[in-house]
Image (spheres, grey):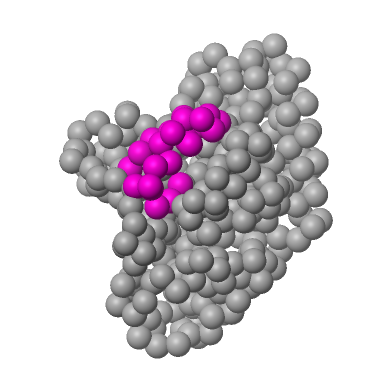
Amino acid sequence: MNVKELEHEYLAATYGRQNVTFVRGEGSFLFDEQGKRYIDFGAGIAVNGLGHGNKKWLSAVTEQAAKLAHASNLYYTEPMAKLAEVLCERSGMKRVFFGNSGAEANECALKTARKYASDKGRGTDIITLKNSFHGRTMATLSATGQDGMHKDFAPFLPGFVYAEANGFEDFRRKCTPDVAAVMLELVQGEGGVIALEKSYVQRVAEYAAANDVLLIIDEVQTGNGRTGTLYAYMQYGVQPDVFTTAKGLGNGLPIGVCLFGEKTQSVLTPGTHGSTFGGNPVACAGALAVLEQIDDELLEGVKRKDAKITSVLSSCRGVLSVSGLGLMIGVECKNARDVMNRALENGLVVLTAHEKLRLLPALNIEDDVLDAGLSVLSGILS
Ligand SMILES: *Cc1c(COP(=O)(O)O)cnc(C)c1O
């Protein structure tokens, strides 16, 4: 049987896959079984932020894999300790917990909020936003404010309250003494690449701080340079009590991290949380190589490339609007799925989010590769 036949026979049918089998990647190019080359505007859903086979990342992970691939959290290992230091120094947070995915990082944030409230003997509800996405586990699915994803999986974890995005009055009304935390995605990714308004986020942050309600920010997709700053909250002018990140930190290997600020750094105590794979030396060595490369020059490039993409696509006849922040871009057009399929036939990988096209190219995509991909896309959208 070939790959597609094996898949249909042996894999749970959870994914509607695009009709292509990728076998190799190099920078912002992917190659299929026949050796056909594609320009990659998807970066493995914002994971391969530095492209495929990034040299520094590759040597960090191969060297670490040869030395020690796993020891478990019963022992000290160096890569996770060093990565925790770099993450805290660059984010202003105090401590971290390592897991293996975005959902796990968010689980940790939600458990921390519940324990923070229970330690203080106060309400344990958590406000999240409508149209948000926080993961696929039962707790993160409960946090996710999309009815479509809730179908078929009741009962959910109690204690979640969904508020209108960008509606401060709705938030304030729902932020009763029962509430322990508010969790925000600063750019709703899966929900259609919609950036929250800065003034809204700042008002929520101020109100939360004044009422001892924790501000949790889900930077699973927006983090690690994707929006033009190391983390998106840095351009919103707020400092979270807890934030999570994953995708781009791994550049291809699974890693998730929950970071704690001043107020929350001592909430989790021995035995209250754990993960067998969490803080895996290979993934952490790779993540260190990723963070090392996210510098001012790369971040300036993200903003410059965003401006170019937005200007080229905004002038296409078939484009109704362009949204997002940095290299997290939503393109409103008719029949986004058809556009995605035609792009693939023409050697360009793009994604969708709800009814939009979604572009998440590598942060270091070369300008000529970006131009070539944009010309395929504007050809389809003109
Ligand atoms: C992808 C994503 C998640 C879930 O991450 P997984 O690694 O798939 O568990 C959670 N929150 C946001 C904002 C995401 O984009």
Which residue is more in the foreground, 360 or 149? 149
Which residue is more in the foreground, 272 or 344? 272
Please say if 220 is above or below 74: above
The residue positioned 46% from the left and 47% from the top of the image is 183
Q: Answer left or right for 104 relative to 239.
A: left
Please say if 112 is above or below 159: below
- Region in magenta: 160-182
Q: Where is residue 227, by image quadrant?
A: top right
Q: Answer left or right for 201 relative to 68.
A: right
The residue positioned 50% from the left and 59% from the top of the image is 242
Q: Answer left or right for 327 relative to 179.
A: right
Whether residue 363 is visible to the viewer of this picture, yes or no, is no
Which residue is more in the foreground, 203 or 253? 203
Please identify the quadrant where the C terminus is shown.
Answer: top right
Q: Where is residue 74, by image quadrant?
A: bottom left
Can you give x and y, in whole percent of width and height, for residue 206 in the image?
Answer: 59, 47
Task: Based on the picture, tell me whether residue 173 belongs to the magenta stretch.
Answer: yes
Please identify the quadrant where the N terminus is shown.
Answer: top left
Can you give x and y, in whole percent of width and height, for residue 330 in the image?
Answer: 60, 30
